[in-house]
Amino acid sequence: MSDAQIAQQILREWKDYGYRDDGVLVFDDENGRYLLLSVGWDGQKRFHYVAVHLHLKDGKFFIEWDNTPEGVALDLERVGVPKNRIVLAFYPLEHRRHGDYAPQ
């Protein structure tokens, strides 16, 4: 399975799990961007936010944003992506250098 297919599969699973009615998938294969948006109404209040944003570049999965309960990094590991190909890009670089995942 290609990296793009992995990203799409994981986001589809999250949409099916927790964002059935209000989840919007955005796949930009040309630029390696994959997003799950949550869009809708909560009574009279409008919501529109990024639930997950993955960016494929330099042979790695950059997790630009992750608003899932468990973390998309664990999903990537479960499908066989090694930690050295996963970047927790929502943390500053100085924090990433001390973790188990790729710093950049």
Image (tube, rainbow, N blue to C red):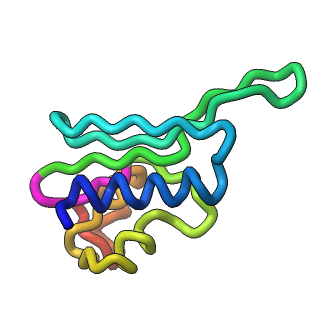
Picture coordinates of residue 41 (x, y %)? Answer: 77, 26
The C terminus - image quarter: bottom left
- Magenta part of the protein: which range? 58-63
Magenta segment: does it hold 59? yes
Q: Nearer the viewer, residue 100 or 60?
A: 60
Picture coordinates of residue 74 (x, y %)? Answer: 44, 74
Quarter of the figure with residue 6: bottom left
Q: Residue at x 48, y 47 (%)?
A: 52
Picture coordinates of residue 98 (x, y %)? Answer: 33, 73
Q: Nearer the viewer, residue 78 or 49?
A: 78
Q: Residue at x 34, y 76 (%)?
A: 79
Q: Residue at x 23, y 53 (%)?
A: 4
Total marks shown come to: 0
Picture coordinates of residue 76 (x, y %)? Answer: 36, 70
Instruction: Judge from the rendering whether residue 69 lies leftward or rightward of residue 94; answer left or right.
Output: right
Q: Is residue 93 above or below residue 31?
A: below
Magenta segment: does it hold 31? no
Instruction: Judge from the rendering whether residue 13 lies leftward or rightward of residue 46; answer left or right.
Output: left
Q: Nearer the viewer, residue 36 or 102?
A: 36
Q: Residue at x 21, y 42 (%)?
A: 32
Instruction: Judge from the rendering whether residue 93 lies leftward or rightward of residue 60; answer left or right.
Output: right
Q: Is residue 5 above or below residue 1?
A: above
